Image (cartoon, rainbow, N blue to C red):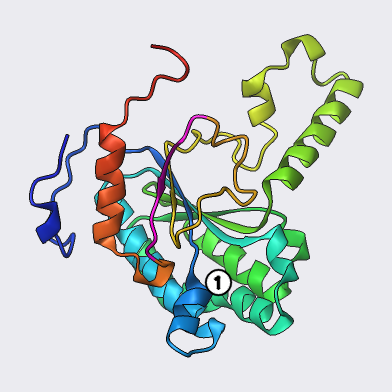
Amino acid sequence: MKIPFLNHIHSLESFQYPEENIPHHIAIIMDGNGRWAEKRGMPRAAGHKEGVSTVVKIVKAAVKCKVKVLTLYTFSTENWKRPKPEIDFILRLPKEFLTIYLPELISNNVRIEAIGNMDMLPAYTREAVQYAINRTRENNGLQLNIALNYGSRHEILNAMKQMFLDINNAKLSLEDLDDQVFSGYLNTAGLKDPDLLIRTGGEKRLSNFLLWQLAYTEFWFTDVLWPDFSEKEFIQALEEYQTRKRRYGGI
């Protein structure tokens, strides 16, 4: 279904999005914060800070569009290779973001969860995220997954280790193992795999994000840098998704 007058949409405030063929689960690789800042002669940290306001806009857009799950790639296991001042700034952003915007997220019935290896993160990051998880636990609207210190290869290896332990301890039979059972060992256990992946910033790769879960996901790439990504681009991605025919290997 095409969305009429898409080019004239500048806000979702009065826009009623059709409920049919909406992605249940959308994953986003939020790329381009540093380049956005460098293009403006600003420190890379300024781009990460600007990207936070984009997160709020897109979460609210997803709520309006009745998306059920939104997973945001916030900090990867590979991001530890960046300069320490940039890492420190990024890992303080969740606390700043949640301090400012948590009441608004709660009013939008958003439930916050986290995926990734949280143990390696600074205490202030873990505490801010856990506080948000606890405060939104009873909400039953959009589930916002924050992927922090997340890497898909690490996730899959950990899942395999736990699965083998369960087999050795007779908690799991090798004969019963299939893709559904294996999925239950991943960080996203219990969640439907993403229907749509959005990546901003012009790159066209997965960057170690949800490799198992994205097996049959529809991809949508844009050159728009994350701080410039708006509700309009979000709707464009959904419109493109509506035109796709998902055959899952069939005809």
Tell me the residue at 64%/80% (across/down).
86
Q: Which residues are magenta?
A: 216-224
Amino acid marked by disc 1: Pro
- Using the rendered image of the protein, determine whether residue 150 is visible from the camera's viewpoint: yes
Find out whether residue 37 is within the magenta segment.
no
Q: Position of residue 19 (x, y in %)?
A: 21, 37
Is 200 positioned to the left or the right of 230 in the image?
right
Tag count in the figure? 1
Q: Which residue is mark 1?
A: 94
Residues packed near mark 1 inside 10 Å, few (<14), some (14 to 19) or many (20 plus): many
**Image quarter of the C terminus:** top left
Quarter location, residue 118: bottom right
Q: Position of residue 125 (x, y in %)?
A: 65, 71
Using the image, determine if residue 197 lies above or below residue 20: below
Tell me the residue at 54%/36% (across/down).
214
Q: Secondary structure at mark 1?
A: helix
Tell me the residue at 50%/75% (across/down).
35
Q: Residue furthest right?
A: 168
Q: Position of residue 122 (x, y in %)?
A: 73, 73
Tell me the residue at 74%/69% (across/down).
81
Is 60 positioned to the left or the right of 75 in the image?
left
**Image quarter of the N terminus:** top left
Foreground pick, 180 / 200: 200
Quarter location, residue 148: bottom right
Foreground pick, 55 / 167: 55
Q: Position of residue 165 (x, y in %)?
A: 88, 29
Using the image, determine if residue 160 lies above or below residue 4: above
Using the image, determine if residue 158 lies above or below residue 94: above
Find out whether residue 217 is within the magenta segment.
yes
- Using the rendered image of the protein, determine whether residue 103 is visible from the camera's viewpoint: no
